[in-house]
Every structure is written in C-alpha cells, then in structure tokens.
C-alpha cells in the first residue's frame, strides 16, 4: 500500500513542478519585456481667464524620445510659450506581479496668456519623436472680459496706471514709461493691518502681465486716501516703477497692456505670539491698464545735409590739433569733441566728405568709435601734412537733426594754423652740389672705386664745416630702436599669453565678439531667429567673461554666474528674464510682447558695459 501510494503521488509532484516552471518562465518573459506607455499631454492650471491674465501650463512627454524642443501652436487670442527650453526629466521603475513598468517623463513648463475675449481650443498639438507623431488632447479655454468696477479708483481694491512720455519721438531718442500700482491697505474688523511687504504678498506675479517692467525693485512711492462711491475713505499704498527706453527703429511700438492679478488678503493671523503675520485666506482681484502706442519717426529726407551721420539731439562740437608744428610727413592728432546728447551711437565727421582736408592731408582710414571723457565723446584721428610751410587745417563740418526745432543744424569748426617743417631725412639725390663736385662751403669729395664707403676716409674732414644741432628728428631716430624693442617684447608676451592662457584670451575678446554677434543678429530678417542669435550672444559673452564651459547657459545658470561675480542683483534678474523671453520667442511668435529685437539689443549692450565696469 505504501509503495502504491508513493507511485500515486509522483505524477502530482511532477505536474506541480511543470506549473512552477511555466510561471517562472512567464515572469522572466514579463521582466525581459517591460511595458512602456507613450503619451504626450497638455495640462493647464485653469481653463477660465480674464483678458490679460496668465496661467501656468505643462507639456508632459512620457516615454517619448524628443530630438528637439517641440514647437507650440495656439489659436489667435491665446499666447502660449515655453518658459524654458530645457525640460524637467524624471524616471521611475515599477514591478507589479512580475510586470516591469518603466517611465521616463520630460516636462516642459509653459505660460498661457489670454489676449482677447472668447472661447478657444488649444490642440490637438502634434509632437514629432521617434519617427512618430503624437497628439495632445484638446483643451478649451474661456476668456472673459476684465472685471472692471464702475466709479473711481477708490472703488477698487487694486488699481493700475500706465504713463508714457513722450508718445511721439525720433529714433535714437528715449521715452519714459512709468507703471503705478495702488493696493488698498488691508482692513479686518475695522482695523488697518500693516503688512511689511504688501506688494510682494498680494501680487501674483506668475499670473500678471507687467510687459517690460521688472517684478522686483519697485519704489514705494507714497500712501494716499481715496473715497469710494459710498463716501467711505480707504487708504492705499502706492508703488511705482519707471524705465527709460531708447527708440532704436522707425515705426510704432506698443507699451503694455498691463494686467495685474492679486491674491488680496481677507484674513491674517500671527504664526505664534511674537511671530510674523501670515495670510490665511485671500480673494482674487484684478486690474488692467490699456496699451499705449508710441510713434517713432526718422529724420526727414528733405533738406538732409551731405555730412549728416545720423545724430539726433542737441550738440556742440570742438576741434583741436596737436602738435601745431611738425616735420613734413609726421602725424598730427586731430581730436573732434562732441558734447550734448544722446551720445550713444554718435559718429564723428566723415573726413572723406571734407574735400579741402583731403587735398592737404593724408589720414588714417579706420573709423574711431570714440572715447567718453567728462560727459563728451572724443574722436581722434592721425592726419599727415602733404606739403611743408605754413598750412591750415580747414574748418570741419558736422550736421545733426534737432528734434525740438525739427530742423537740421550744421556745425563748423574754426580753421587751425600749423607749421610744417621740411623733412630732415633727405635722400642723396636731393643733396645740392656746386660745379666741380664741391658742395657749398664743403670739402672736395673724390669719387673712388668700391662704392660710397671709400669716400669717407676722414670723418672729421667731412664734418668740419657742419654745426651739429640735436633736433626732434634726431630724438625720433634715437627713440625708434628702444620703442621697437619694447613693442616687439609686449607683442610677443601678448601672443604667448593668448596661446597659453585660453581663459584670459576668451575674457579679453568677450565684449568685442558679443557686440559683433548682436550686430549680426539684427541683420537677420527672421524675428524668431533674431531672438535665438541675441540669446546666444549674451550667453556666449557670459561664458567667455567668467571662464565658464562653452555652450548655452540656462537662465538660472546666468543668474548664478552674475551673482557670484558680484554684479547688481536686479541686473542678474533682468538678464535671466531676458533669456527666458528669448527661449519663448524662439518657438512662439508674440511671446516677447512689445519688446523688439532692437530694444533687446540695446539692453544687451548696456548690460555688457555694466558687467565690464563692475568686474574689472
């Protein structure tokens, strides 16, 4: 019986082993073939906005290997831009019942802006990756009219005012834009509660649209009291921010519109008996300022002088020359000093357009960018007199356009008298000899075979009747060798350092290369490409200036680099925001708002000059 039972149990054990083996095989197969769910999704934090309001959004790519930053598209009336071209990447692995699920997620942070009233559908958007096309589910956005309150400023919890002056100007001039925000002081239970930072506490920066105005560094202007329609009096804190904008291109620019969203506190508590006040509840409040159009004009073609070089403003000119006595062929430094404003971009008189000067003097062809000295622009050029004797540097003319009188003005310098001595280094064929081979009052020279050297047998005899005078020509000749030696030494050291110290070489060339890239960017006809080139010019400059690895810096990396270098904190924030704007403008038209590439280029030049001065 026992033997029979043993025989009966063997088949069951064998079957169980087979089943276990099969399950193990299935687990191994599942482990070897992990599940990859691929998708592209658009998420928004809210689907209801007011005109001008912004909201955060995300483009989430799951298990999709993107080869480049996706290009976004949105209907007219909705602005959609990528905040940063570098996505946030996360990876995870899960094993459930032997099934391996791997997830790789790339998340792009987006900014959604409501431009006009209506209902808009975003998507489905197509994303190309892995040779396939993925589509997002459509998202409907409802945009409502601004919730404006009838009555005056006293009926509003928050008000916004935008001022621009002047609203009509000429290119290269500047206009001043001022943004004012008033916030009603918090009143709870009939008592005023003073918050230390009401502006920073109440304003929702991520949902507001401040145009080109910064989000930090505002000036607390004053405190005012205003009555509402019912006659109740309310106290407001007023904050103001102003900026000067240089007009770089002829045409029309738009400042604004401005939209401010506030989470206005309705209840405040202290975290502990002696702690800080904390907002425990708030309600949404909005305010809006309409856009202001600025007309930028160019100088008229009619009546434009031939020597006009583009200066627009009010100026005075002075011309000087040093030294006023030289040998023929020796240089004279011609200095042209221009005072007035604006001085940025002012060019000196065009010497090629001064025919009388060209007939009497030769001059260097390279144009000088000028030096700023004591509030004036000084341009220096070397000129070389062609003839000996009493000479005159003729009057130089220079024209500018006066925007106040709206007419061209031509300035002329006074003529400058100079004395040009004959060149002291005469060649042998210019030595006058008397008949018979004798010079005037000199010693008879006998021509011998073997060239000139055999004639100089007795040096004292040759020089016996010559009075030696140590002139400037001798001084110049004697100084040539030491100066040449010094120049060669300095040049050799400079070239050796350029080759051996790469970081120093990059730093030395950083500004020049950046300005060249900015000029190239503005010459590009495609606006979206202009933003890419401007961004590369700025990040390349920062990398070269601070010895960072070559390559595009992220906005955060740029801010950190400037902070470590000890530059102005507000400028670091401006640079970071500009790079974010460039990243967005490269992929979405209109993402830069009213900021034009020319205005951005002016900001870049100003930042570069500030960095150069603060990091010497």
Image: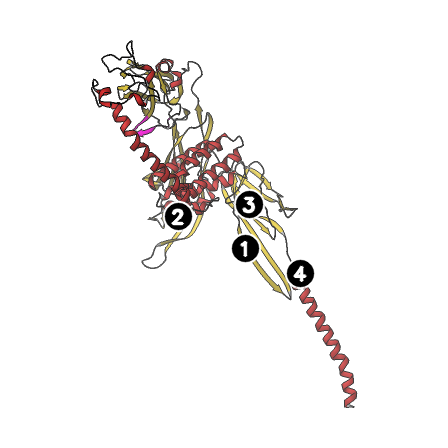
**Location of mark 1 (residue):** 90
Local secondary structure at mark 4 = loop
C-beta proximity under 8 Å, tags 3 and 2: no
State the CA–CA distance, disc 3 to disc 1. Answer: 26 Å
For marks 4 and 3, give the CA distance. Answer: 39 Å
Indicate whether 358 appears above or below 174. Answer: above
Measuring from the top left, give residue 53's x and y in whole percent.
Answer: 49, 41
Of label 3 and label 1, which has the lower sequence position?
Answer: 3
Choose the circle earlier in sequence order: 4 or 3: 4
Name the one closer to the observer, 132 or 365: 365
* Extreme residue toward the front, this view: 449
**Residue stretch rendered in magenta on the structure:** 368-378
Q: Are marks 3 and 1 in contact (CB under 8 Å)?
A: no
Which residue has dot 4 on it? 33
Task: Give the quadrant of residue 104.
Answer: bottom right
Give whichever of discs 3 and 2 has the lower sequence position: 3
- Upstream in sequence: badge 2 or badge 1: 1
Question: Closer to the camera: disc 2 or disc 1?
Answer: 1
């Amino acid at each position: 019986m026992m033997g029979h039972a043993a025989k009966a149990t063997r088949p069951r054990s064998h079957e169980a082993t087979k089943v276990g083996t099969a399950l193990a095989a299935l687990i191994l197969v599942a482990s070897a073939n992990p599940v990859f769910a691929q998708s592209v999704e658009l998420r928004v934090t809210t689907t209801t906005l007011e005109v001008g309001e912004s909201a955060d959004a995300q483009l989430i790519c799951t298990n999709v290997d993107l080869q480049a930053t996706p290009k976004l598209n949105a209907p007219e009336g909705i602005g959609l831009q990528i905040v940063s071209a570098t996505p946030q990447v996360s990876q995870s692995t899960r094993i459930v019942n032997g099934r391996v699920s791997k997830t790789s997620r790339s998340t792009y942070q987006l900014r959604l802006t409501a431009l006009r009233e209506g209902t808009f559908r975003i998507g489905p958007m197509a994303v190309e990756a892995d040779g396939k096309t993925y589509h997002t589910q459509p998202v409907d956005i409802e945009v409502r009219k601004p919730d404006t309150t009838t009555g005056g400023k006293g009926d509003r919890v928050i008000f916004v005012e935008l001022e621009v002056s002047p609203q009509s100007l000429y290119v290269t001039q500047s206009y001043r834009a001022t943004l004012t925000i008033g916030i009603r002081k918090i009143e709870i239970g009939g008592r005023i509660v003073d918050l230390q930072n009401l502006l920073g506490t109440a304003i929702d920066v991520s949902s507001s649209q401040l145009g080109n105005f910064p989000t930090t560094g505002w000036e607390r202007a004053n405190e005012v009291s205003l009555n509402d329609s019912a006659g109740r009096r309310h106290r407001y804190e007023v904050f103001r921010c102003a900026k000067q904008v240089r007009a770089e291109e002829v045409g029309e620019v738009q400042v604004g519109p401005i939209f401010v969203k506030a989470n206005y506190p309705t209840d405040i508590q202290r975290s502990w008996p002696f702690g800080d006040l904390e907002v425990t509840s708030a309600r949404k409040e909005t305010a809006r300022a309409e856009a202001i159009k600025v007309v930028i004009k160019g100088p008229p073609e009619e009546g434009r002088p031939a020597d006009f070089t583009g200066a627009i403003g009010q100026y005075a000119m002075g011309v000087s020359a040093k030294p006023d006595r030289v040998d023929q062929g020796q240089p004279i430094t011609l200095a042209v000093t221009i005072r007035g404003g604006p001085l940025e971009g002012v060019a000196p008189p065009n010497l090629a357009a001064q025919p009388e000067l060209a007939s009497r003097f030769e001059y260097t062809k390279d144009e000088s960018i000028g030096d700023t000295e004591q509030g004036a622009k000084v341009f220096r050029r070397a000129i070389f007199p062609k003839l000996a004797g009493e000479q005159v540097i003729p009057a130089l003319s220079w024209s500018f356009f006066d925007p106040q009188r709206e007419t061209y003005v031509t300035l002329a310098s006074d003529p400058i008298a100079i004395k040009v001595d004959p060149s002291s280094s005469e060649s042998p064929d210019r030595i006058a000899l008397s008949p018979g081979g004798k010079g005037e009052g000199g010693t008879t020279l006998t021509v011998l075979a073997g060239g000139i050297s055999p004639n100089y047998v007795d040096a004292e005899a040759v020089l016996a009747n010559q009075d030696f005078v140590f002139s400037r020509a001798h001084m110049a000749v004697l100084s040539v060798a030491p100066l040449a030696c010094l120049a060669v030494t300095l040049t050799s050291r400079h070239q050796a350092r350029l080759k051996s110290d790469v970081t120093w070489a990059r730093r030395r060339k950083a500004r020049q290369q950046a300005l060249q890239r900015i000029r190239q960017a503005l010459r590009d006809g495609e606006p979206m490409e202009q933003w890419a080139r401007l961004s590369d010019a700025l990040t390349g400059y920062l990398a070269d200036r601070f010895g960072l690895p070559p390559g595009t810096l992220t906005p955060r990396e740029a801010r950190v680099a400037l902070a470590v270098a000890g530059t102005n904190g507000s400028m670091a924030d401006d640079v970071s925001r500009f790079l974010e704007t460039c990243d967005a403008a490269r992929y979405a038209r209109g993402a830069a708002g009213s900021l034009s590439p020319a205005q951005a280029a002016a900001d870049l030049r100003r930042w570069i000059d500030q960095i150069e001065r603060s990091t010497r």
